[in-house]
Image: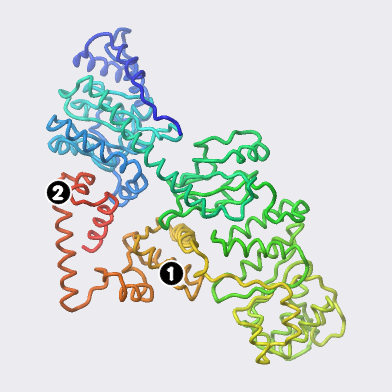
Amino acid sequence: MAKPPFSLEGYKASDAEQGRPYDEGETNKAWENFLTFGDLRRENAPVRSVIEDSWQRSVKSGVDARGKGSHLLASPDDLYELRLKNDDLLGSSAETFRRIAEVLGDAATMVVITDRNGVVLEVGGDRRTIDAGHDIRLEAGAAWGEAVTGTNGIGTALVTGKPVHVHAAEHFSEGIKAWTCVGSPIRSPIDGSIIGIVDFSGPQAIFHRHNVALAVVAAHHIELALSEKIRIERMRLLEASISRMPGMNSSDGVVILDRFGRVVHHNDMASVRWHRIAQSQDLSIGRQLLPSDDGFLARDLAKGLPEELREQRIEPLVVDGVVKGAMLVLAAKPRTGLARSQMSPAARAALVSAKDAIVGCSDALLQTIEKIERAALGRTAILLEGETGVGKELFARLVHAASQNTGKEPFIAFNCGAASKELLGGELFGHAPGAYTGATREGRPGRFEFANGGVLSLDEIGEMPMDLQPYLLRVLEERAVYRLGDNKARSVDVRLVASTNRNLKQEVAEGRFRKDLYFRIGVVKFTIPPLRERLGDVEILIDHFNRRFAETYGTQPLRFEAATMELLRRYSWPGNVRELRNLVENLVLMTITGIVAPRDLPEDFVEPAQSSSLPQRAGHRSTGPEGDEIARFDEVERRAIERAVATAGGNIAAAAEKLGLSRATLYRKLHQYRSRT
């Protein structure tokens, strides 16, 4: 992990260029000349080069020289999202913020933390200075990038990547020339990129050279706190990866990625495998292998990998119910290792896509996938058994993808329970002209003929009528189909994948399914594990569907409280993955606050837990005395929060510390209470 940058060299060099003490009158004259003539008009003008360069950039960006501060202010919802996205930065800044406030006391100085684009996330310090800052929009949510407000400590530090002080008349915009500001970049401990700015601002009389050093030290302390946080997250990712190790080869390479898709750890064997797979680049700590949207990895991890890595195994790593990273396995040999070299690039891509569609990383699921891949290399029929909603069609498509050579082999799916007895035979086997009432005059092929050369997936095979079952058995035995009403045999090369949620063995015993057909289609049989047996997959599936539906409906992904995730983990999921998918879609559409509390779940999820160990939530208020008491508690909490925030002058970090809450919890509660008004 890279050591956080800590240097004043950039600042000292530019300060030395000043040559004489700051003169406000002379600097203002130089500014007027610059606006009039486009330059300083004389070589010994008392303007440092860092300021002159910034003035030039301000002009090119079209900044209003007569402006009075920032004119871009994020909406409350956008600011809320920005704070959530920068939660690591804000959390790591909290202790430094508190100490700076103690050092400054009532020194007429405010402290500002911004994101990597110069948008103010947090303010603190002297209350009167914070109030004065509203006049120039130096407040939470305001954009202070150089292209917006011209030369200033925040924006110019972002552009130069160095600590910068901007004193009074050195500002480009006239409306902020009564201020002095000192900005210092905060850099990522992993890759050294700028992730924010810490800035001290106030009236020009506050300027002292030690303020620059103080800003640099503050940034350094924040970077150290970030380093410690990253170290802890890295350890938790390594712990999460250990549970995924069983079944791996000792010669496999392992690469651990964080939630930003960056490499945080790899074993020695990974370096060896890496050079064979991707010879052009080194496998280095901090290198980004997966795309990330501010800490949210894409749903389809394999698709985000560089092309040469897409056939490698990659699994999400879940920490506290949330996907916080991924484990990439650079295998010593293919997991199935049979005939994969004969597959065309299109067929290999189809196989990767089919596996990506089956979301989860539990041992039960991975073992089933690997066994089905192996079975797919044969030609015999495969029977998939499993409860309603486990996703049997996805596994049928996996059989198809794993058995392809060209990538063009057909896949035909048909539900035996979706057609009447009279039409089912014609749909499967085809019919001759006028073979039965309702048949077409021209005749038509059936699903077997359409699937020739590929896979026919028959769902709900147990619904097939007894008098049609001999026809199916004959097709499988003779590898030829006879259309209804026609004696001509038509050869077909079809791989059958049958699926059912029934116990076919029981159906045979009770005379509702032919024994000979059962043995013919069940030579290779798999039971798809129900969701309740897939340890750890509930969290991964929730994250998957949460992001998918958020993207579909144009919203931000939901956030789930810890108590909510615990309820969802303990639920038995009788409807399996389909039930979970429908629940998440409903929550994405109906949840107003963006945070899912236990009260937002259907009663089936909440009531059993409430009756045993969990207290009743405020959202489930009864009409009796207990409900009135909860309502009064909510009101008392709301007033306490509002009073704390007001007392702290809008400083969320200070209010959260006073209330004994985390900043994220305070943001959430504010959002919830405001949405009720």
Which percent across, then down, holds residue 20? 24, 9
Q: Which amino acid, mark 2? A: Ala
- What residue sits 80% from the left and 79% below the top? 475
| Nearer-N-terminus badge (2/1) | 1
Where residue 626 sits, quadrant-wise, is bottom left
Q: CA distance from mark 2 to mark 1?
A: 38 Å
Q: Secondary structure at mark 2?
A: helix
Looking at the image, residue 458 lies above or below residue 375 = below
Q: Position of residue 80 (x, y in %)?
A: 31, 50
Picture quadrant of residue 391: bottom right
Identify which amino acid the numbered label 1 is placed on.
Answer: Leu
Q: Residue under label 1, please give it.
A: 583
Task: Name the side, left or right, on which 616 lies relative to 382.
Answer: left
Reading the image, the residue beneath label 2 is 646
Residue situated in front as seen by the camera: 6 or 676: 6
Vertical comparison of 370 with 55: above or below: below
